[in-house]
Amino acid sequence: MNKRALSLLLVSLVLSLCSSYPWSESASASESESTSDSQTPRLELWYTSPAKKWTEALPLGNGRMGVMVFGGPQQARYQFNEDTLWSGSPRSYANPGAAEYLPQIRSLLFEGKQREAEQMATKHFMSVPIRQMAYQPFGDLILEFPGHQGYEEYRRSLDLDSAVATTQYRVNGVSYKRECFASYPARAIIIHLSCDTPRGLSFSASMTSPQEDISSTLVDDQTLTMTGRVRDAEIKQVGEIASKMLLTSHLHVLETDGITSASNGVLHVKDASNVTLVLTASTNFVSFRDLTGNPQLRSRQDLEHIQNKSYQVLREEHISDHQELFERVSLNLGNPPKIDLPTDKRVIRYADHPDPELEALFFQYGRYLMIASSRPNCQPASLQGLWNNQLNPPWDSKYTVNINTEMNYWLTEPCNLSECGEPLFLALGDLAISGSETAREQYDAPGWVLHHNFDLWRGTAPINASNHGIWPTGGAWLCQHLWWHYLYTGDRDFLETTAYPIMKAAAEFFADYLVEDPRQDSHWLISGPSNSPEQGGLVMGPTMDHQIIRELFKSTIEASEILEADQDFRANLISLRARIAPNQIGQYGQLQEWLDDVDDPENEHRHVSHLWGVFPGEEISIDTPGLLEAAKQSLNFRGDEGTGWARAWKINLWARMREGNRAHKVLHGLLKLTDSPLTDYRGGGVYPNLFDAHPPFQIDGNFGATNGICEMLLQSYRRTDDGLWLIELLPALPDAWPKGKVTGLRARGGFDIDFSWLEGQLREVVILSTSGGACCLSYNSLQTTVNFARGETKKFDGSLLLK
């Protein structure tokens, strides 16, 4: 081979290697549009500048540990959480003797003396203390990079499919890259740093925490540990409450080709080209009644568990674990122009330009956040999921159960993340224990009860104020998720050992709690004292309560029939259910929010509680046209605006009402950028990192919107006259999505469903039955009954004809 040929070969080889090297692409991607025939939506959030605000940082989580990645070149901040780090300590919130005042409170309300009833309830009926505890930030990992202030070609991103956050930039001709992920198998946060120049990477690492008695100790020149305790809580209306939660975290240099050293609580790495860091964290939490755990031992054991694994192995195990859940569902809403804009700028553009790929990204982001914040043997996703950076977060970042916690978990079954519901079911087991004490002390009743909030210590008594805190149907609503899990999976053992005992005990409470309304000749049974969240004050008989209790009784009755258990109790529930005050249509043609016809058509309150029977309930549907029209009138009164989560609920409601274009309009309004330098808007919508904005941040809007999109495409809550599940395809397809394909959605009865559509018409359907049995497939006016063996797959064309 001559020299010229050899030179050309070498040049070709170098160019080939450069083209595949991760830093060869310009990090400041062009901000433009071009047509693309790609069938695979790009599931990535990306930006061309570091995060300055917390709601610009990118979230990672393994169900137990969460981290917000800011991506600063000179200072990289990783703000992290651990899901059992809360203020306070084990305690009972029940108010002994409160039950003595229950008859008097009811009498005052029946007499129309609401103010007097609220005053009596405030004095004698509220939780002790009157407020619950708060989810806490654990700390910050800070990496300092001297000389990196003059960076260029910056890009940071979050790949939803791999659950890896990446930061890339160049300084003085050297390309730097950081990858971070929160691994469920490893029980740790992993950070890998690299550069394309030998010995080009040097930095220091330290940990800080806003908690008390924080101490950082160097174990060796590769390991740093931080210990402390949670600050005592300063509670409004209460004062100081001692916190007994202890914390420990470890930071360890797992592997590097550089030199490590340590001094003054800081780890140093110099002259490296790659480094892998491992962050573990733990508390002394054992259960809601037990704080005898050893956080130092736990955190160290998590570190030792992965001590001999390479970064590549940890990364592969993490991605495999994540994708087993995430890749069950895909969604393509057509072939839009390829939009090469950073995510926040893309949301701005979306205000005036259709972008179905952004909507599909938002759908999958909700599924991503669920996987990140709710995994088996962890705590449920709270008001902020897994992520919190404040000592006094909004609403304590706890579990608000008059809509928010339930909205978090609407998506788990239909969006094929059933395992992610397990933390909620475990929490319900705890709540049935603490709630039985509240039922006994506050109502002198059997069973268990939960009001509108709970915390890590499983408080179930009414908190905050009597005009909205006394709302006893939180536990009854959460029981819906137990029942759904059975309906989607057919898991009889789960029904018998987990779901039914909790559902039955909740029903026992309401069988005792309901009272006859002396103001009505009909002798209806009503709920009270209660409220319609979170307006109207303390009342007797809010519509939402009755809808929830009717559904609880209905599902408990059906469960007892399936299990052939408790025949006498079942008969009593059937009798009581028939006597509960029915839904009422008021003077404006609206569905009444209360027994009295006092709805204000100008009221645009964020809660639409009386529409619970439309969604997530089932008693108002196209099968009850009069009530459905009344519900539409009420929803029209509320308007299409509101907080982020309120808009998410409205997407689901309009989908159930078969109003696809209206549902899409509300979705469009939710995907509105807020609290960003790119806009002056500060209302409900999404932050630059696509977190839902109430404002402030509440994650329920993310989860609720994902489920709303699912409801637009597939519904399976109705049954045929002979009891088969009615699987309805494209029940609320908007004009904005004329073409698309979805795979992996789930329907009740244990069916996995893929389908596609073109020009607004169903094209093909593929159904896998995981349980065996029959269903009725429905599209527009077409219906067909199909029988399946367990594990059988069948294909249909757009006319529902078997292929």
Image: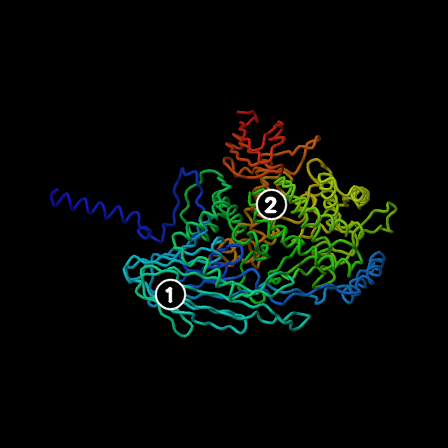
- C-alpha separation, residue under disc 2 versus residue under disc 1: 42 Å
Residue at image coords 67%, 44%: 495
Image position of 572 with respect to 55: above or below: above
Residue type highlighted by circle 2: Ile
Residue 410 in percent (x, y) is at: 61, 47
Residue topped by disc 2: 651
Residue at image coords 50%, 59%: 55
Question: SS class of the residue under badge 2?
Answer: helix
Residue 535 in percent (x, y) is at: 71, 56
Residue located farthest toward the left when viewing the structure as drawn: 2
Q: Is residue 712 in view from this perspective?
A: yes
Q: Nearer the viewer, residue 496 or 451?
A: 496
Q: Nearer the viewer, mark 2 or mark 1?
A: 1
Q: Nearer the viewer, residue 114 or 555?
A: 555
| Colour scheme | rainbow
Residue type highlighted by circle 1: Gln
Earlier sequence position, callout 2 versus callout 1: 1
Compared across the picture, whether 51 is left or right of 727 comes to left
Residue topped by disc 1: 74
